[in-house]
Image (spheres, grey):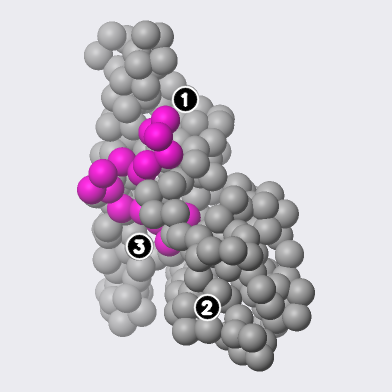
Amino acid sequence: MSTLLFYENVVPLNRDQHRSLRLKPAPGDFTFARDTPFVPMAGSEFFPAAKHYPVLFSGPDDDTGAVALLGLTQGSNLFVGKDGNWTEDTYVPAFVRRYPFVLAGSKESDEYTVCVDDRWKGFGEDEGEALFSEDGEQTDYLKRVLDFIQRYHAEMQRTQAFIARLRELELLVRRDLQITDPQGGSLLLKDFRVVDEQRFAGLDDAVIVEFHKAGWLPWVYAHLLSLSNLQGLQKRLQVARKAAAH
């Protein structure tokens, strides 16, 4: 599963090359995610996300990840308006909040490099938060950013262990999800995976205890609860189409 999506030009953050780089925060500006219909999600986000989005599993068997479904068509995020704002009082996934920073690396190595999307319009040299001091040391601002993306990376690794266990127990099943509106229109979402609720209910007590101790049990329940948001996405799409027609 791609972990870059809306990143345009990812380059390693370098204390020499980027010594004078500043980042002008743009709170509320999510234009970069406007065309993204789903984003990766860590298990620790399932509960806040489940209030607003379907949390599904996607990707090939050897690279399955959890995602928050943000739209029902390619190139459409139903939670970012024309003004670039995210829908008010709606959880913004950590994958989105970490932009324009990212940890880049490979599964074969435990070494990761801090990178940035240097195409983001917030970067410049005249105003904003400095990333490095004149001596090339990380500023307090950059340290806070790095702490956030490193904690997010750790949660994503924990989530991969959770998904691997779901696959091992054959709890993830493919579902083509069909959404039908009151007018009879329908949309078909293909190749997503969900936890098979019946199989999960039939697990041995020892496995349930294992999930509880690992902190995974609430993740399963949040995922199953989130599936009720599919109809809400359909309604959002209808509203967006009506607005575009006027």
CA neighbours of label 1 inside 10 A, class few (<14), some (14 to 19), many (20+): few
Q: Magenta region's main secondary structure?
A: loop
Residue at (29%, 30%) from the top-left corner?
231
How many numbered marks are there? 3
Residue at (37%, 42%) from the top-left corner?
85
In primary-sequence order, the first of circles 1 and 2 is: 2
Kindly identify which numbered label has been placed on residue 188. Answer: 1
Q: Are marks 3 and 1 in contact (CB under 8 Å)?
A: no
Pinpoint residue 200: horizontal percent, then vertical percent. 33, 58
Q: How many angstroms separate mark 3 from mark 1 (CA)? A: 26 Å
Pinpoint residue 159: horizontal percent, then vertical percent. 47, 68
Magenta region, residue range: 81-96
The relative height of residue 222 versus residue 18 in the rendered view (above or below) is above
Pinpoint residue 219: horizontal percent, then vertical percent. 32, 63
Residue at (47%, 25%) from the top-left corner?
188
Q: In the image, what residue type sits under mark 1?
A: Leu
Kindly identify which numbered label has been placed on residue 45. Answer: 3
Foreground: 114 or 196? 114
CA neighbours of label 2 inside 10 A, class few (<14), some (14 to 19), many (20+): some
Q: Are marks 3 and 2 in contact (CB under 8 Å)?
A: no
Secondary structure at badge 1 equals strand
Secondary structure at badge 2 equals helix
